[in-house]
Image (cartoon, grey):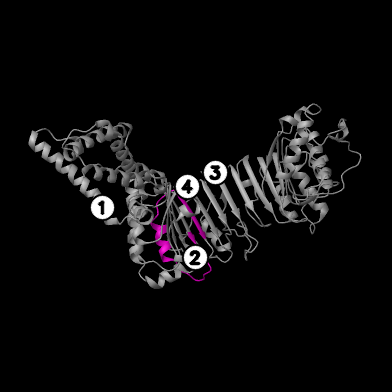
Amino acid sequence: MHSAAIVAFLAVALLAEGSPIAVGPLVSTEALLHGRAGLPLCTYHIMVWFVAGLSIGALVTRILADEREPCICDEKPQWDAPPPSGAAAAATGVCADILYMVLREALAPQPVDIAQWKGALALAAVCHCWRQVALPLVYRSIFISFSAPERMPRGGLRALLPGKPPSRAECSTNAGLAMLAGQAHTARTVRIAVHRPVPSMAFFQGVADALKLRTSRWPGARLVALEFGPGVLERMGKEFADSSVFVRLFAKSLCGLTSMDIAALGPGRGQQCDFLSALVDAYSGRLLRLSADVDLSLRAARFSSQMTSLRVSMGPLCIQALPAVDPGPLQHLSLFDVVADFEWSIFGGRKEGGPLVFSQLRELSIGYSAGAPVSAPDLRRNQDAVQLRFPALRRLHIFRCPRSCALLDRSIYPQRLDSVVVECASDAVVLERLRGIVPSRALTVLLAKTDHVDPDRYYRATSGIFGAHAVSDRPSLVLRAKGSVPDPARIDWPCLAALDIRTYITTTVLLALLAKLPGLGSLAATYLISSHFPTDVHIPSTRTSGNLSCAHVVHSKVSCMRLRFVMDSKLADTDVRFVLYLVAGTASLRTLSTTPATCEKLAKLMGSWGGQYPHMQRVGLIAALG
């Protein structure tokens, strides 16, 4: 009888603790036994407490009878403590031996074979230790979601990613929060998504408790992300009029965080966002990311004086002002769709004398979407405007910059930058201003349509960027929109190092472009269209031999190519011939990324031409899907 009880207990323990299906996100022992094994919860609890009671009772009886000193297994294991060291983990086998001795004395009147139970008990002890200590360490990300029931996938993340390790844990109810609170302190990322319906106060109390437990035990918490769905903030203001309740819940929980991400999703207008203002004001970490496509008003808040990274992404309708940022410790600043009032406030918005110096700022990103209703202001238009200085800046990213953008001014930067990325919306004036920008080691220019721009002015401006006196050591060009491909006969870009064509281009035009780019080292063509291939180019076939004329060598410096034909399923022989022409004429090519159909044909032909073009064997073919 006792042996049968031990066997049943070990079977249940191994099923619950050691089975692969038990290590899914938030798949607890109770849920597993109740859902998969069909075993009632009370049965499992009775078996566990029955065996534990027998073990403890036998141990106490043995101690009282023999008057021996207490055993080390009397101490209650601290499962909520930080992960055990190597010595503590090695003691698992010792505890298993002690547990075996207790069970043998209590359950076996007659002597039994030690080897018969030692391995099983040790395995059960290891499985129990894995569930209590090691398993929470696997959860690198905790995702707390409160949304409509139909939005939650059945089985959580395990149903979406079968066979994957449990890298995230999800819960959508208050009951799940109780279990999550015990494991949240081991995760590096906690994401809280609040969608409709509006949760109760108990939900936020559980979230606050989980965060407080996490920050108190692990002060190096990386990120807490708060995501509010469309209309949730407005409904929360109606349901919970007193926002101080939320402040009391989250203020102490956020004090130990180093990074926080806040996202407010639309559509919505006129939200006061007192709750978000309180969160921003209570947050004292170093990294803050704020994303919103609704009108926000956070004038009452203040940014942390310890902040080193601020990333703000607003929608086209968000024109409300935010608090000014402290330029002292700031190292990363990213602003997207920051229109007039907001930009004025983020850069100070004050009439103090002297420049506003960002002494430690390393990276600055500022951009505008096509739907922004207000153009970027010129901070120099008034006598009392803020004068900016970035003496330590290394990377500058400007997207869709208008003509009046104050960041296209050489006087506010150091002598040289590491990287400059500028996206121009077919504005020759911006291109001309780029000629006077501070020199950089790497300059990337993203161009849109150029068909409605004065050609003479356009090519004159680009010649100053990619010409013989380029402002960068490794300038690169990205052609993104239809009509942005320049005329090969008019370009003069000897210093262009990388060309990325993300629009439709024919093979004939591409060959003409490559012939005018002697300094090119990287080529990418996403949408290649087959055209008439030059008839004077002789490429040997698989049956006849021949050599490629030196007059038709494409380039000798290109080391990386990424080619993709539009109609990959209808790949013609001329397309493969074109790619072979590029490979055979580029001796320094090392990597060629193309479509699967092209890669398969090229692999066969390049293998047969190894004797004639040895460098073809050194080209790595990568089949780029999509």
Residue type, numbered disc 3: Arg
Residue type, numbered disc 1: His
Q: Is residue 35 found left or right of 324 in the rendered image?
A: left
Badge 2 or badge 3: first in the primary sequence: 2
Q: Which quarter of the image is occupied by the N terminus?
A: top left
Classify 10 Å Cα crowding around label 1: few (below 14), some (14-19), many (20 and above): few
Badge 2 or badge 1: first in the primary sequence: 1
- Can residue 350 be seen from the camera position used here? no
Instruction: Look at mark 4 in the image and give the residue it sits on.
Output: 308
Q: Is residue 456 above or below residue 576?
A: below
- The front one of 564 and 599 is 599
Whole-percent x and y of residue 596?
A: 70, 44
Instruction: Look at mark 2 in the image and give the residue it sits on.
Output: 296
Q: Are marks 2 and 3 in contact (CB under 8 Å)?
A: no
Q: Are marks 2 and 4 in contact (CB under 8 Å)?
A: no
Classify 10 Å Cα crowding around label 4: few (below 14), some (14-19), many (20 and above): many
Distance of label 2 from label 4 (alpha carbons): 23 Å
Disc nearest the viewer among 4 and 1: 1
- Can residue 500 be seen from the camera position used here? yes
Q: Which residues are magenta?
A: 263-291
Distance of label 4 from label 1 (alpha carbons): 50 Å
SS at circle 1? helix
Whether residue 88 is in magenta: the answer is: no
Disc nearest the viewer among 2 and 1: 1
Distance of label 4 from label 3 (alpha carbons): 10 Å
Q: Residue at x 83, y 44 (%)?
A: 574
Residue 45 has which mark? 1
Distance of label 2 from label 3 (alpha carbons): 28 Å
Residue type, numbered disc 2: Leu
SS at circle 4? loop
